[in-house]
Image: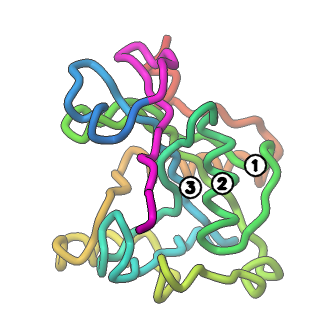
Amino acid sequence: MENILPEFLQIYNQFGQMLMPMTLEQALATPDIFYGVANIWLIDKENNLLCSLRGSESKLGPNLWQCFFGGKLKVGERHREAAIRELEEEIGLKVLPQDLVIIDKGFVQDKKRYFESYAYCISEERIKKLKPDLKEIIQTRWLSLEQYNDEIADSPDSWTGCFNFKQQGEILRWRKLIKIGYPFESSLIRAKFI
């Protein structure tokens, strides 16, 4: 019989400070404790969003669409490190830390998550090289933000996770600023952590 060890995660308090690792079950049962999660939105040059259909064996949202890639932080891992690892694991995309732009961060109280959400602008050349892990992702497709919002409105039970209008606005602002050579700092983060 195989002995399966519990998965320990990177844990945070309500101030975003790292704490000792715990299992997901321990974190969910402990007040004012959150487990770390990294999310990454892949955006093409036309500002379309890569969405994926999760496989039936996926631990999070099986058989549901999602508009991001990502997952839980492993012990000792920072959010950006987890984002890089998850992109490579889920779709075979290798990125550098400086290529990820932070769009939002904060707490999802009811799910006990401390998240950081990033965006990455992917080139056509790199799109062709994506290799989804078929155990986790069974289909991908590109949607404009308008198409994404229409699908969420029409079929909310077909989707997991969310991409709210403020986050969408920040991504569009980022894309405009980098096109004209200006630096970007997310106003969502500034507003929450100043």
Q: Position of residue 38 (x, y in %)?
A: 52, 46
Circle nearer the N terminus (2, 3): 3
The x and y percentages for residue 125 are: 83, 81
The reply to whether the C-beta atoms of the residues labelled 1 and 3 are less than 8 Å apart is no
Q: State the CA–CA distance, disc 2 to disc 3.
A: 15 Å
Residue 121, quarter of the rendered image:
bottom right
Answer whether labels 1 and 2 touch (C-beta < 8 Å). yes
Look at 47% across and 28% down and name the residue there. Answer: 21
Compared to 50, does 60 lie above or below?
Answer: above
Front residue of 153 and 5: 5
Residue of label 1: 178
Q: Is residue 97 left or right of residue 143?
A: right
- For image coordinates 47% across by 75% down, the residue present is 51
> In terms of image quadrants, where is residue 46?
bottom right
Judging from the image, what secondary structure is the residue with disc 1 in?
helix
Say what secondary structure mark 3 lies in: strand
Q: Amino acid at mark 2?
A: Arg
- Could you say where residue 82 lies in the image, as x and y percent from the top left? 62, 46
Q: Which residue sits at x=45%, y=49%?
A: 5
Q: Which mark is residue 40?
A: 3
> Of the residues under marks 1 and 3, which one precedes in the sequence?
3
- Reading the image, the residue beneath label 2 is 175
Q: How many marks?
A: 3
Q: Is residue 155 left or right of residue 106?
A: left
Q: Which residues are magenta?
A: 1-21
